[in-house]
Image (tube, rainbow, N blue to C red):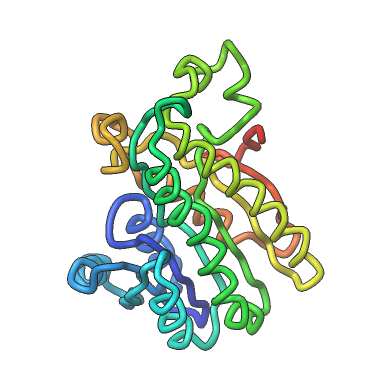
Amino acid sequence: MNDRTALVTGANKGIGKEIARQLVAEGLTVHVGSRDAERGQRAVREIGGGARLLVLDVTDADSVATAAAQVERLDVLVNNAGIMVDGRTAPEADLDGFRRTYETNLFGVLAVTNAFLPALRRSAAPRIVNVSSGTGSLTWSADPDHQFAVSAGAGAAYRSSKTALNALTLFYAQTLAPEGFKVNALAPGLRSTDLNARAAASDGDPAEGAAGAVRLALLPDAGPTGGFFSWDGTPAAW
C-alpha cells in the first residue's frame, strides 16, 4: 500500500468497479463512489484491499458536498458515473431525457471535480480522468465510413453529453496545467455493462477498458494532458 488515494464515481459496478479494483491492485486507497450505500459496500467487499465506500450521488449537491468533506487529500479523480436514458435521435428526443443525461454525464462531472479540487490540490501529482465515449467524437460521427456515422444520429443525448464532456476535459486541462494537473478523457470502447442493450450484449471485457483509465490515472509528470485517448492508449479523434 502506498499513500496515494483515488476516487472513482459510479464504482459499484461495470467499468467503474473494475477501475477501482485495478487501482487498488496498484496500491492505492480507493474511494468507491456509489449512490446506494448497500451496493457500494458490496463492491468494496468484493474489491477488498484499499477499497473504501464513499456514498456519492453526482447529481445531488448535498451528497457531493458531504462526500467532499470526508476526503482531505486526493491524488486521482476518475469521473466514471454515466447514464444513457434512451437511444433516440435528436428529432425524436424527449427534453427531460436530455436533461437527465446531462445532469449525470456533464453537470455531475463539473460538480464533483470542483468540489474535490481542494483535495486534489493537496496532491503532488493530481490526475483527473473523465470516462467519455468514442461515440462522442464529432470527427468519427461525421465520417461516413466510420461505424459511429452509420447510426445516423442515434443516442443523441448520450453522445452529445460525451462531446460536451470532451470539451470540458480540455478546458480543465488548460486551466489546471500550471498547477501540475493531468486531465484527460478516455474512450473505453464497447464493454459488457448495463449501460444499454448493445453494451449488455457485448463481449467486451470491462477490465480492458478500465486499464485505459488506470493508465491515465497514473501518468508520470511527463505524461500528456488535455487529450482524448482510446482504451489502448492511442489518441482518439475529437
Looking at the rendered image, the quarter that the N terminus falls into is: bottom left
Left or right of 119, for residue 25: left
Left or right of 221, for residue 93: left
Q: Residue furthest top?
A: 145
Left or right of 112, for residue 46: left
- Count of numbered badges drawn on the protein: 0
In percent of width and height, residue 117 lies at: 61, 76
State the residue at coordinates (77%, 59%): 174
State the residue at coordinates (45%, 66%): 26
Q: As rendered, which of 64 and 76 lies closer to the eye?
A: 64
Residue 235, above or below 15: above
In percent of width and height, residue 233 lies at: 59, 42
Q: Residue furthest right?
A: 178
Q: As rendered, which of 2 and 83 lies closer to the eye?
A: 83
Q: Quadrant of residue 203?
A: top left
Residue 49, above or below 163: below
State the residue at coordinates (65%, 53%): 168
Residue 84, above or below 75: above
